[in-house]
Image (cartoon, rainbow, N blue to C red):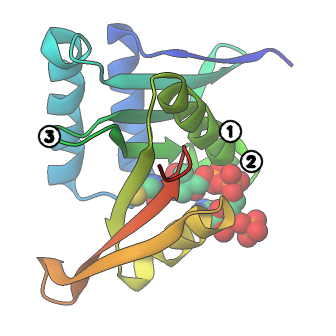
Amino acid sequence: MSDLIRPVEPADIPMILRMTARTAMFKPLEVEALQEVLDDYFAVTMEMGHKASVLVEEGIITGYAYWAPAAMTDRTWYLYWIAISNEVQGKGRGGRLLRHAEDDSRSEGARLFLIETSGTSQYERTRQFYLKYDYTLCACVPDYYADGDDLCIFEKRLAPKA
Ligand SMILES: CC(C)(COP(=O)(O)OP(=O)(O)OC[C@H]1O[C@@H](n2cnc3c(N)ncnc32)[C@H](O)[C@@H]1OP(=O)(O)O)[C@@H](O)C(=O)NCCC(=O)NCCS
């Protein structure tokens, strides 16, 4: 089977948006926000060091990730988006993309890698995913997204503490 991880291209955007909507994990407003993020990526943020890659298998996009350095920090990076096609979740692809984003950030000098997600029961498996790949839950903000919907921040050090 031929597969690869490569940078996102403008023609990938419709497929990425469809895949994201089909996970049913994101609100329509969040999918719209993703469209803006990807449009901005090709317009400006790619030049500022943002990264976006797709996993392609037999010519079909089965997942993507988007990560970037956090402004006004010393080499802290964020994973902003990750999703895998519904049909092929739970088979290691998310882990592969996550490691790709970590390796790439490390090669850019990243020190700390952060991921934000929701504390609701709908996101229980997503939180398990980050724990499985050695992230630590380092902070929570109660009622951040909405009442009853906490912000959970996961972290992994990519370089040892100075
Ligand atoms: C979260 C996600 C990116 C993980 O990718 P994946 O390829 O399914 O995960 P992997 O196969 O690499 O890792 C499997 C682990 O992830 C967790 N997991 C999360 N969602 C899962 C799912 N739908 N199916 C199976 N495992 C899932 C489990 O802890 C699992 O570990 P286990 O096999 O020991 O039970 C993917 O399931 C997804 O796109 N989910 C919907 C969108 C989403 O939640 N994005 C993140 C928003 S912050």
Residue 159 is marked as none
Residue 72 is marked as 3
From mark 1 to mark 2, how far is it between C-alphas?
A: 6 Å
Q: Which residue is mark 2?
A: 92
Disc 3 crowd, CA 10 A, few/some/many (<14, 14-19, 20+)? few
Q: Which residue is mark 1?
A: 96
The image shows residue 51, relative to residue 148, as above or below, that is: above
Residue in the picture at 35% in, 82% down: 120
Q: Measured from the top left, where is residue 6 in percent x and y?
A: 56, 14
Q: Label 3 is placed on what type of residue?
A: Met
Disc 1 crowd, CA 10 A, few/some/many (<14, 14-19, 20+)? some
Q: Are marks 3 and 1 in contact (CB under 8 Å)?
A: no
Q: Name the one closer to the observer, 150 or 84.
A: 150
Secondary structure of residue under mark 2: loop
Q: Position of 62 compared to 115: left or right?
A: right
Q: Is mark 1 within 8 Å of ligand 1?
A: yes
For the residues carrying marks 3 and 2, which lies nearer the camera in this image?
Answer: 3
Secondary structure of residue under mark 1: helix
Q: Measured from the top left, where is residue 35 in percent x and y?
A: 21, 31
Q: Label 1 is placed on what type of residue?
A: Arg
Q: Is mark 2 within 8 Å of ligand 1?
A: yes
